[in-house]
Amino acid sequence: MIISGLKQRQIPPPGTYTAYLAWWIELGTQFYEGEWEWKFSTHWELTETRATFKKERGPEPFLLGKEITAYIGKRANMRKIAEAMFGRSLTGAEVASFDTEKIRTCGKPLMVPVSHETGRDSETYPIITGFAPVRKGAKVPAPVLPTLHYRIEDGTGGDFVKLPSWIQDKILASRELSGDRPTKSEIIERNVRQAAANATAEPEPDDSDEPDDVFDLDAYSDEELRKPEIVKEIREIIENLPCSNAEKANQFRYLNQLVRRANTPAAPPDFSIKVEGGLSDDEAAEIDEINKKLAAEFTEPDEYDHDNGPAT
């Protein structure tokens, strides 16, 4: 018998979930990639997906975290959260001077796509990959988890003691509480590590023909895009995005490209016999016949119905 001393974590399966903002935590000004940036740690209650974490409490919703920057640019997560909650695009005046308290106090649900990633410790982690509005007319249950709001001005008081230790450590390392700026040697060391990582990383794909994403379609795996129910769910999310019809059309077009790619088998290996010169007509005819039989082993990929899945 082989047993493990490791405790198995419960995580939600990949998919798109209705979510409420449960925790809004100010991390303060954090040193990130050579610059100081104001950060928030947001935690989302997946209201309709539950598991038993402690027997005495029974089934509870999952709570997933997403760290965001205090930035309201077009592609920023904070902008996506605000527009998904409000169900509309932000006005120019709102973008020029956005009050983050509007997000914390909004209380409206949104949709979050969740995928799985493998960490350096070989553990599988659920990752929130985007934010989108709830489908119009959808009935959403009320949240059940208690909310938590931490302000950096509270220091180690307020709700600080309720936070997980790893979040406490981040807050204590903020410029507001630590007062320490990274040394020159620390910055150089970080830049060297980043340069080494960039040198070994695969080049970024050319996305010049891809849409100006409001919703991150690339977060979905080929396996997920082969499931008609997930594709249908994505299409509903795109339909309800707070953007122009032209942007929606680009999203639908790109989704169709991804679905076709996910459902098209890789080209079969070429087992044909290739001989250059020196063959008689009879030998060439025999090899040609063998190659035809080998080619017959493979068929063209099925056509794909984007609403109902592969043709059968």
Image: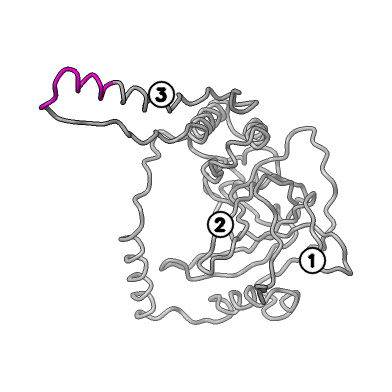
Which amino acid does the dot numbered 1 rest on?
Phe
Q: Of callouts 3 and 2, which one flags the residue occurring earlier in the amino acid sequence? A: 2
Q: Could you say which is closer to the camera, residue 44 or residue 70?
A: 44
Q: Is residue 181 above or below residue 67?
A: below
Asked whether residue 281 is drawn in magenta, I would say yes
Residue at 55%, 82% in the rendered image: 178
User: Which type of secondary structure does the marked residue at label 3 adopt?
Assistant: loop
Image quadrant occupied by the C terminus: top right
Q: Could you say which is closer to the camera, residue 36 or residue 205?
A: 205
View extreme (front): residue: 282
How busy is the neighbourhood of tag 1: few (under 14 within 10 Å), some, or many (20 plus)?
Answer: some
- Contact between labelled residues 1 and 2, with CB atoms less than 8 Å apart: no
View extreme (left): residue: 278
Q: Could you say which is closer to the camera, residue 135 or residue 287?
A: 287
Q: Coloured how?
A: one colour
Marks 1 and 3 sit apart, C-alpha to C-alpha, by 54 Å
Which amino acid does the dot numbered 3 rest on?
Ala
Q: Which residue is mark 1?
A: 53
Q: Which residue is mark 3?
A: 296
The picture places residue 271, in percent across and down from the top left corner, at 32, 34
Q: Of callouts 2 and 1, which one flags the residue occurring earlier in the amino acid sequence? A: 1
The picture places residue 61, in percent across and down from the top left corner, at 79, 57
Residue 85 appears left or right of 289? right
Q: Which residues are magenta?
A: 278-288
Residue at 36%, 64% in the rendered image: 197
Q: How many marks?
A: 3
Q: Which residue is mark 2?
A: 117
